[in-house]
Amino acid sequence: MKFHDDIVMDLKKWIASNLSEKIVIDVISERSGYSKWYVQRLFRKVTGITLATYVRQQRLSKASCELINTNHTIAYIALQNGFADQQTFHRVFARYYKQAPSKWRKNQSAGRG
């Protein structure tokens, strides 16, 4: 199982350094040298979540930190974290955090100050 963990760890590192890019399974598969099917299956087996879910969680986590720690616009943060546009980011963020990015930012800032 160590070998599988190493593959997944390598994928996670690559994903972390490419969050602003369009991450698709074809690129991940090609980069890893394994089939799309194998990469997806292995990732889920090791982590318990799908590759797509992992990428989305990492993007949202990074974006949420940027919302708190920077004054960048929401549109800028969305694009810098690999979302197609602000509307897509808003929809995905609201689904995950149960509130709009602007409201979440305001609430987090109020809690810190």
Image (cartoon, grey):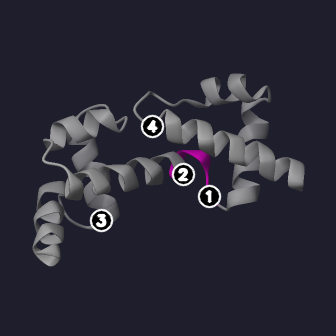
Specify whether 63 is left or right of 40: left
In this figure, which residue is indicated by the disc labeled 2? Answer: 54
Q: Amino acid at mark 4?
A: Leu
Q: Amino acid at mark 3?
A: Tyr
Quarter of the N terminus within the rendering: bottom right
Asked if the residues shown at circle 2 and circle 3 are in contact, with their CB atoms under 8 angstroms apart, the answer is no
- Dividing the picture into quadrants, the one containing residue 44 is bottom right
3D distance between C-alphas at marks 4 and 3: 19 Å
3D distance between C-alphas at marks 4 and 1: 18 Å
The residue positioned 35% from the left and 39% from the top of the image is 81
Element at badge 3? helix
Of marks 4 and 2, which one's residue comes earlier in the chain?
4
Of marks 4 and 1, which one's residue comes earlier in the chain?
4
Residue 86 inside the magenta-drawn segment? no
Mark 4 or mark 2, whichever is nearer to me: 4
Asked if the residues shown at circle 2 and circle 1 are in contact, with their CB atoms under 8 angstroms apart, the answer is yes
Q: Which residues are magenta?
A: 49-53
Q: Which mark is residue 49?
A: 1
In this figure, which residue is indicated by the disc labeled 3? Answer: 97
When the figure is inspected, residue 73 is found, relative to residue 107, above or below; the finding is above
Whole-percent x and y of residue 80? 31, 34
In this figure, which residue is indicated by the disc labeled 4? Answer: 19
- The reply to whether residue 41 is in sight is no
Of marks 4 and 3, which one's residue comes earlier in the chain?
4
The residue positioned 26% from the left and 67% from the top of the image is 98
